[in-house]
Image: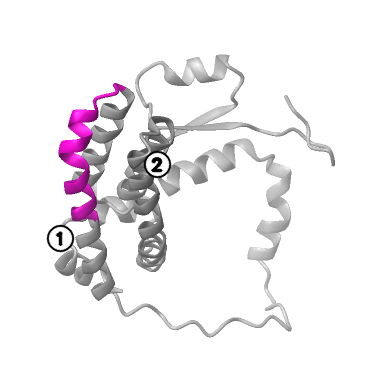
Amino acid sequence: SPHYAIGGVCKIVALTANAILGVRDELLNLGFDEYLSKPVQFENLESLLIKLIPKSKFVNINNALNMDEPTQNIVVPDLQPSTINMQTLKDMLPQLNIATALSYCNDDIGLLVDILHIFYEDSPQQLRALKQFWNEKNYKKFIIQIHTLKNQLLNIGYTKLAEDAKALELAAKENDSNFIEEHLDSFVNTYTKFLQQLERVL
């Protein structure tokens, strides 16, 4: 296995959307230490970290968590809790499977809201890049870009639009330009309308 310059073994984990039977053995045979299927669920990531990180590395953390006396001189930021709750998200964003999205956030509604903010801020540039790559007929970059959008949509629980992205990705891999010409504008328009909807929530 590779080693860090400062010493210690570097564990390599594959992230893959391919969760079919036998893929784990195949990846391990290729040299990976373990794999996680995408979208990554928090509890699976946590379990994997516990499995791969030497137990001795947890000693100081456990000691810190079990301290009897409070640590002095630590300033805790005065964060305002989000006013957005699960019911608000369900009512205002019915396209999303909120339960699925929360499962990727350890059921932390605040973290999900943060991810939605990032999604909202990042998506316009992502869509511009997607359209640019298609206009240039750069299939390789188009496939990478639509794959990225698909995963982002899965992460926030927008399963239906993620399926549409997957169909576009498969069409690009098969050089099916007719399918993309027929469906890309609809995908982008639906995505854009959702961002407008999301803006009102955030």
Q: Which mark is residue 24?
A: none
The colouring scheme, among rainbow, by chain, secondary structure or one colour, is: one colour
> Which residue is located at x 18 percent, y 31 percent?
179
Classify 10 Å Cα crowding around label 2: few (below 14), some (14-19), many (20 and above).
some
**Image quarter of residue 8:** top right
Q: Tell me the magenta residue range.
A: 174-191
Tell me the crowding category of disc 1: few under 14, some 14 to 19, or many 20 or more residues within 10 angstroms, Cα based.
Answer: few
In the rendered image, which quarter contains the C terminus? bottom left
Where residue 127 appears, as percent x and y from the top left, is: 34, 52
Q: Secondary structure at mark 1?
A: loop
Q: CA distance from mark 1 to mark 2?
A: 25 Å
Q: Nearer the viewer, residue 168 or 35?
A: 168
The residue lying at 33 percent from left, 25 percent from top is 173
Note whether 114 is above or below 133 in the view shown.
below
Closer to viewer: mark 1 or mark 2: 2
Residue 138 position (above or below residue 26): below
Cβ–Cβ under 8 Å for marks 1 and 2 = no
Circle 2: element type:
helix
List the residue tagged with mark 1: 94
Question: Which residue occupies the foreground of this view, 110 or 147?
Answer: 147
Q: Which residue is mark 2?
A: 145
The secondary structure that dominates the magenta segment is: helix
Asked whether the viewer can see residue 130, the reply is yes
